């Protein structure tokens, strides 16, 4: 337990330039408190003390703003930066040396049973507000950009961006193709949707303007 705590403190010092001291991290960092509480809740969950497990996890949620289901499996040296609004589902798995920013959801799509939540590999960074949904795998050393919605597996050493997320780099090299997201066809980029609607309204106004000008000219023809 003490080795795990020492490793977590070292990980925060390495990843967070605002971390000034060990005491500050131990007493004031909600991410560390949430993970420590989760270790206890997960032990209870594994030993069929489900009510106690949920009690510990919900108490931690109220104190830290981070909701981790006691069934989730979390590896070593997880760093949660800020942490407010993070949700990690029951069957989610997180590898070692990961970094997760606030507003992240590791959730389900509502269509799966059993394994419903994502598996995150080692040394993965998940940016602010990103949503990773379904029983998918995010490969080792990958990066998920802020506010992305990930619905398909991401290969190792890749960078994924967008809604729905697409891989734009693998091992530092640009990828020129766009991945299909055929199993969640109703998820679209809201910016693209709004732009298309705006273009439609502009075209409608132009047609009305043209018709008005034509009718006006006909009215005044002698």
Image: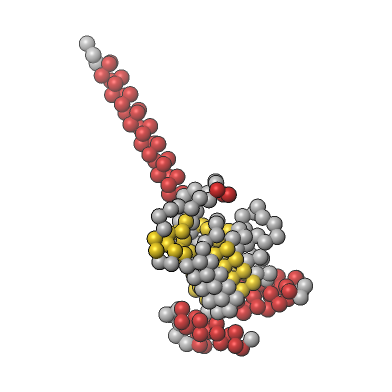
Residue 12 drawn at (x, y percent): 49, 81
Q: Quadrant of the C terminus?
A: top left
**Residue 107 is at least partly visible in this image:** no
Residue 55 vs residue 95: left or right?
A: right
In the picture as drawn, the residue positioned furthest to the top comes out as 222
Tell me if residue 218 comes above or below residue 24 in the rendering: above
Tell me if residue 38 comes above or below residue 112 in the rendering: below
Q: Nearer the viewer, residue 159 or 176?
A: 176
Residue 54 drawn at (x, y percent): 70, 70
Residue 207 vs residue 163: left or right?
A: left
Residue 195 drawn at (x, y percent): 40, 44
- For the point 33% across and 31% down, the residue is 206
Q: Quadrant of residue 67?
A: bottom right
Q: Quadrant of residue 145?
A: bottom left
- For the point 52% across and 88% down, the residue is 23
Residue 12 vs residue 46: left or right?
A: left
**Residue 180 is at least partly visible in this image:** yes
Q: Nearer the viewer, residue 156 or 104?
A: 156
- For the point 46% across and 78% down, the residue is 15
Tell me if residue 155 comes above or below residue 216 in the rendering: below
- For the point 60% across and 84% down, the residue is 4
């Amino acid at each position: 337990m003490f080795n795990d705590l020492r490793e977590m403190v070292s990980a925060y010092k390495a990843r967070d330039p605002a971390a000034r001291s060990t005491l500050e991290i131990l007493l004031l960092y909600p991410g560390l408190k949430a993970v420590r509480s989760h270790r206890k809740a997960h032990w209870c969950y594994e030993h069929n003390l489900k009510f106690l497990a949920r009690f510990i996890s919900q108490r931690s949620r109220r104190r830290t703003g981070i909701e981790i289901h006691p069934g989730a499996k979390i590896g070593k040296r997880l760093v949660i930066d800020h942490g407010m609004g993070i949700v990690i589902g029951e069957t989610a798995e997180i590898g070692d040396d990961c970094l997760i920013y606030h507003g992240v959801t590791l959730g389900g799509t509502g269509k799966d049973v059993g394994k419903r939540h994502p598996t995150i590999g080692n040394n993965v960074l998940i940016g602010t507000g990103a949503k990773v949904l379904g029983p998918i795998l995010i490969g080792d050393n990958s990066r998920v950009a802020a506010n992305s919605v990930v619905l398909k597996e991401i290969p190792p050493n890749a960078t994924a961006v967008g809604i729905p997320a697409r891989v734009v780099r693998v091992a530092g090299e640009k990828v020129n193709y766009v991945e299909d997201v055929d199993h969640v066809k109703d998820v679209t980029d809201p910016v693209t949707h709004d732009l298309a609607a705006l273009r439609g309204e502009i075209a409608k106004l132009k047609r009305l303007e043209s018709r008005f000008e034509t009718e006006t000219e006909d009215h005044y023809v002698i």
